[in-house]
């Protein structure tokens, strides 16, 4: 080997006769190092070809092998699925070790194993939850949800608090509004209270603004439990016109206005949106708007209290690329099935946002964060995602819910994509060992709730679609006190007719246009036409300039850049090659020297 390596050096020296010895040696060293660098690069290049070839071979042996997402913040795809290195090569990760033990084949044993110990089987993570895929078939209808060999930490599984605002940057033209109770409210010694106030807020003469942050301005640190600021664009709350009348006792969720800001007792008093997303509010033609403040107080001290809390909302006219959308999954308080039995260690109720509801989406949407809400007996909440009759993942899970420690959970690091026609099933668990009577859905602390406030981008074209999205199996309860209920739209009181219109009802009582159904929904039923053809992933690939979560959401050779598909399509690339000075012959003339150098590298090694 030593002799073979010196020979070309001596040849170079012979060719440099006539130059000074010092210069010759210097040039020889430079040229020698250049040759070394070239050969090293070629060896690395040839190795990368072999690695890529191996990766491609093994990728065909597992479902979605070329489309496994990178769970780390930088996103993208994990090419070397069985390796600790993203690009492949080197040490095997837990999935790679199990894959090797199975002879590099996708077996049922490997499919049902949980190689990385994150609570999901390898099949669930790679889009084959039923372990029916075999080598040689096209990729499953379900996408790869996560990486089977990279351990999700508890933070990754349950989410992280999204309201820390640690990376928030104030826009240059930020417009901040402070909205507080005009005077302190007096809270007596009983536990649960609701107080509201309507105020008129002057707004800038701008067509649209994006909300980027809101903060809760807490006065009394002990008794506020949760609060809302509602924007009443037409000036009318369900409580009637009470602007300028000061705080008043109120009850029930606001149904005629849209949410501007919200807060619940927990580790943070502020919430910020990702830098490429804003929540849009249109103030076209308005000089002022009505804002309704709503506060729920939980007075556990048993003594009279006072409070004068409020909100600060930050908006900007520098519109961001994406608009935030909202949804409410779970079970409506008025559902007659919302009955929680006492003396139970674990009692579950379930609410469905059916396929025909999400069919109203005009394009896929991507999760940003979620906020689970139950009351005193609530212990856990999960919303599962179904596509074409099969569970494909989750859009929010909290294993240890605490009524007095509520928080928003970040989903932006996960690739959660909801297609038109998906069904969302929310399950809430309660512990009622300390209860002697049944619990029902309601607004008071002693009642219960089961809601997943879910946030995503882009906002749907239909304003307020999925706000809420509940399926009622047996109708809506009119009065929990006397148990009156109805099972069909026939004979329904006028106030409730907007809820139930034929089989598919719009929640028309407010401008949000949420969806409710009055029939038994099954998450395994699907309205998505692509389920028949098995082309859901392909049918909804995004074009340039359209929203995305990962590169695999984009068509052709496009890539996902800050939530939008970017780059050139394959057709564009072929056109640029054809028109370039290199051309096909030029490319061929470049390829042959590479192979020659690869061969030389093998000899020199």
Image (spheres, helix red, strand yellow):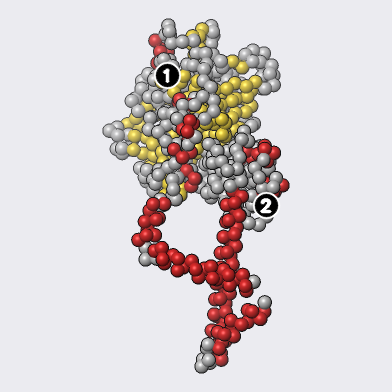
Residue 130 appears in the picture as rendered: yes
129 sits left or right of 213 in the view: right
Q: Which sits earlier in the primary sequence, circle 1 or circle 2?
A: 2
Q: Residue 501: horizontal and vertical position, in percent?
A: 40, 15
Quarter holding residue 292: top left
Nearest the eye: 202 or 576: 576
Circle 2: element type: loop
Which residue was labeled with disc 2?
92
Mark 1 surroundings within 10 Å by alpha-carbon count, few (fewer than 14), some (14 through 19), many (20 or more): many
Quarter holding residue 29: bottom right
Which residue corresponds to the image point at 36% horizontal and 32% vertical from the top-left?
201
Q: Residue 356: horizontal and vertical position, in percent?
A: 45, 25
Which residue was labeled with disc 1?
505
Q: Residue 552: horizontal and vertical position, in percent?
A: 49, 45
Mark 2 surroundings within 10 Å by alpha-carbon count, few (fewer than 14), some (14 through 19), many (20 or more): some
Instruction: Specify the farthest residue to the left.
Output: 285
């Amino acid at each position: 080997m030593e002799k073979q390596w010196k020979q070309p050096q001596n040849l170079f020296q012979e060719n440099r006769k006539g130059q000074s010895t010092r210069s010759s040696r210097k040039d020889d060293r430079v040229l020698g190092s250049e040759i070394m660098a070239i050969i090293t690069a070629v060896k690395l290049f040839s190795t990368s070809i072999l690695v890529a070839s191996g990766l491609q071979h093994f990728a065909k042996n597992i479902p979605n092998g070329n489309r496994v997402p990178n769970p780390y913040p930088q996103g993208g795809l994990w090419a070397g699925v069985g390796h600790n290195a993203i690009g492949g090569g080197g040490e095997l990760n837990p999935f790679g070790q199990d894959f090797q033990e199975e002879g590099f084949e996708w077996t049922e044993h490997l499919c049902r194993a949980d190689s990385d110990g994150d609570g999901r089987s390898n099949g669930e993570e790679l889009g084959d939850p039923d372990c029916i895929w075999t080598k040689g078939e096209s990729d499953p209808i379900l996408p790869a949800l996560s990486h089977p060999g990279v351990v999700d930490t508890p933070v990754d599984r349950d989410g992280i608090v999204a309201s820390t605002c640690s990376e928030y940057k104030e826009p240059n033209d930020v417009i901040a509004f402070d909205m507080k109770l005009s005077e302190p409210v007096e809270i007596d010694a009983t536990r649960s209270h609701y107080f509201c106030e309507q105020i008129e807020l002057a707004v800038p003469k701008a067509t649209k603004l994006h909300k980027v942050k809101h903060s809760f301005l807490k006065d009394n640190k002990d008794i506020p439990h949760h609060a809302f600021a509602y924007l009443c664009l037409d000036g009318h709350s369900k409580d009637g016109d009470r602007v300028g009348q000061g705080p008043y006792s109120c009850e029930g969720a606001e149904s005629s206005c849209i949410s501007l800001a919200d807060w619940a007792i927990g580790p943070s008093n502020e919430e910020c949106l990702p830098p490429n997303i804003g929540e849009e509010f249109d103030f076209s033609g308005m000089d002022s708007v009505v804002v309704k403040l709503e506060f729920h107080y939980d007075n556990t001290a048993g003594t009279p209290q006072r409070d004068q809390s409020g909100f600060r909302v930050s908006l900007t006219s520098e519109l961001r690329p994406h608009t935030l959308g909202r949804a409410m999954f779970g079970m409506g308080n008025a559902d007659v099935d919302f009955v929680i039995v006492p003396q139970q260690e674990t009692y579950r109720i379930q609410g469905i946002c059916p396929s025909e509801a999400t069919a109203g989406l005009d394009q896929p949407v991507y999760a940003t964060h979620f906020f689970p809400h139950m009351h005193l007996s609530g212990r856990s909440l999960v919303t599962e995602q179904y596509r074409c009759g099969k569970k494909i993942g989750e859009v929010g899970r909290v294993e240890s819910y605490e009524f007095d420690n509520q928080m928003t959970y970040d989903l932006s690091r996960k690739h959660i994509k909801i297609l038109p026609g998906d069904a969302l099933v929310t399950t809430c668990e309660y512990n009622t060992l300390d209860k002697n009577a049944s619990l029902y859905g309601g607004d008071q602390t002693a009642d219960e709730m089961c809601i997943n406030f879910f946030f995503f981008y882009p906002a749907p074209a239909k304003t307020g679609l999925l706000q809420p999205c509940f399926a009622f199996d047996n109708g809506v309860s009119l009065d929990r006190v006397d148990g009156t209920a109805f099972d069909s739209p026939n004979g329904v009181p006028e106030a409730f007719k907007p809820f139930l219109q034929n089989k598919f009802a719009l929640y028309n009582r407010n401008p949000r246009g949420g969806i409710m159904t009055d029939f038994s929904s099954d998450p395994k039923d699907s309205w998505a036409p692509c389920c028949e053809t098995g082309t859901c992933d392909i049918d909804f690939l995004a074009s340039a300039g359209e929203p995305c979560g990962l590169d695999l959401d984009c068509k052709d050779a496009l890539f996902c850049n800050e939530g939008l598909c970017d780059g050139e399509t394959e057709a564009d690339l072929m056109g640029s090659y054809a028109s370039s000075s290199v051309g096909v012959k030029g490319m061929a003339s470049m390829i042959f020297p590479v192979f020659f150098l690869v061969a030389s590298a093998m000899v020199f090694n």
